[in-house]
Image (spheres, rainbow, N blue to C red):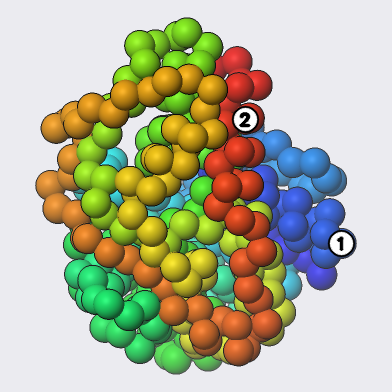
């Protein structure tokens, strides 16, 4: 099997390369921006690609001829989407259309896995029960709007052109190597800097009451592989742990795992213009169709993230 990973220069990319190449034995071509470096613990083909350059996307598809395409390329930070909405729209919507058009025009019979977000559900997810794929999305931020647009466009291409497309709504994923612009990586990095005497013993926080569904990235990419093999064309699948926890509880666990005595202070700059109180995935459909369930405990993820920062040069 040949798999093309679009946008492998981000956090998830190297984990998906390892999953598909090392664990499944597929031939993997992974794309990145020229300014990025790809790291993986296995063999793979690396290619520079700007998703906004449709001609370049077309040329790569013609050359590699993948059986599966995993579309990871995105501006994935909710906070940054408020600051740079036009960039978020360009990458997340225009970039996705460029990929779909290139596949369509080439007549390529690849299965495409379009990676979206649990953020698409937005305010619709704020209920006592977990949100399933039949729930109508109600995006609460600009990033979520672009990902919902990607989902709808993918559905149209699937129906209109009989393309083999599956959409994913991935909920919050965490793990070693994630940038500190994301909340769990940020807290772990601050805790380690305090341990190492690099900063005062205070972690600055925003909204700790929000509840989110956190899953280890290594479980997430395993789900992507199972969806590629066993998912149904035209369907959308939630990928998450199936359990929302308050961000406060994650921070409490990080403080317990740290060797330092840490104080918590609220920072108004870390609050978003709008925030959905609770987002929790119902993963019944994914489990039924593929048999996938998460296996890595949150504490294991947090320990690995903290060890990553303890061993980091940054």
Quarter location, residue 118: bottom left
**Sequence order check: which comes first, mark 1 or mark 2?**
1
Q: What element carries label 1?
A: loop
Q: Pointer 1: what residue?
A: 25
Vertical placement of residue 37 versus 168, above or below: above
Observer-nearest of 169 and 7: 169
| Quadrant (top left/top right/bottom left/bottom right) for the N terminus | bottom right
Residue 127 drawn at (x, y percent): 24, 76
Observer-nearest of 195 and 1: 195
Observer-nearest of 295 and 229: 295
Q: Can residue 303 be seen in this view?
A: yes
Q: Can residue 89 be seen in this view?
A: no
Vertical placement of residue 70 versus 49, above or below: below
Horizontal side of residue 77 vs 112, given as left or right = left
Q: What element carries label 2?
A: helix
Quarter location, residue 22: bottom right
Q: Residue 308: which numbered mark, if any?
A: 2
For marks 1 and 2, give the CA distance.
27 Å
Q: Residues within 10 Å of mark 1 (few under 14, many from 20)?
A: some
Which callout, 1 or 2, points to the residue nearer the camera? Answer: 2
| Quadrant (top left/top right/bottom left/bottom right) for the C terminus | top right
């Amino acid at each position: 099997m040949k798999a093309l990973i679009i946008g492998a220069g981000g956090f998830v990319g190297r984990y998906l390369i390892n999953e598909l190449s090392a664990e499944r034995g597929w031939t993997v071509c992974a794309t990145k921006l020229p300014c990025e470096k790809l790291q993986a613990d296995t063999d793979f083909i690396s290619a520079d690609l700007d998703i906004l350059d449709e001609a370049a996307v077309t040329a790569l598809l013609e050359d590699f001829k993948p059986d599966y395409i995993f579309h990871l390329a995105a501006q994935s930070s909710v906070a940054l989407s408020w600051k740079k909405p036009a960039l978020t729209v360009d990458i997340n919507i225009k970039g996705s259309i460029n990929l779909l058009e290139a596949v369509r025009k080439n007549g390529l019979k690849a299965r495409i896995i379009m990676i979206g977000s649990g953020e698409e559900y937005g305010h619709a997810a704020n209920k006592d029960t977990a949100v399933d794929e039949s729930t109508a999305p109600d995006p609460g931020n600009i990033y979520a709007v672009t990902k919902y647009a990607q989902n709808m466009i993918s559905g149209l291409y699937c129906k209109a052109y009989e393309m083999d497309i599956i959409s994913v709504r991935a909920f919050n994923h965490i793990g070693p190597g994630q940038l500190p612009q994301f909340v769990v990586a940020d807290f772990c990095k601050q805790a380690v800097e305090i341990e190492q005497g690099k900063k005062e013993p205070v972690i600055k926080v925003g909204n700790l009451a929000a509840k989110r569904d956190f899953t280890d990235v290594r479980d997430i990419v395993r789900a992507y592989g199972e969806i590629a093999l066993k998912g149904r064309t035209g369907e959308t699948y939630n990928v998450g742990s199936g359990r929302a926890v308050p961000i406060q509880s994650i921070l409490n666990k990080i403080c317990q795992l740290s060797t330092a005595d840490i104080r918590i202070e609220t920072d108004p700059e870390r609050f978003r213009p709008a925030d959905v109180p609770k987002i929790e995935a119902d993963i019944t459909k994914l489990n039924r169709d593929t048999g996938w369930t998460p296996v890595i405990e949150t504490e294991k993820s947090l320990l690995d993230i903290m060890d990553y920062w303890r061993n980091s040069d940054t």
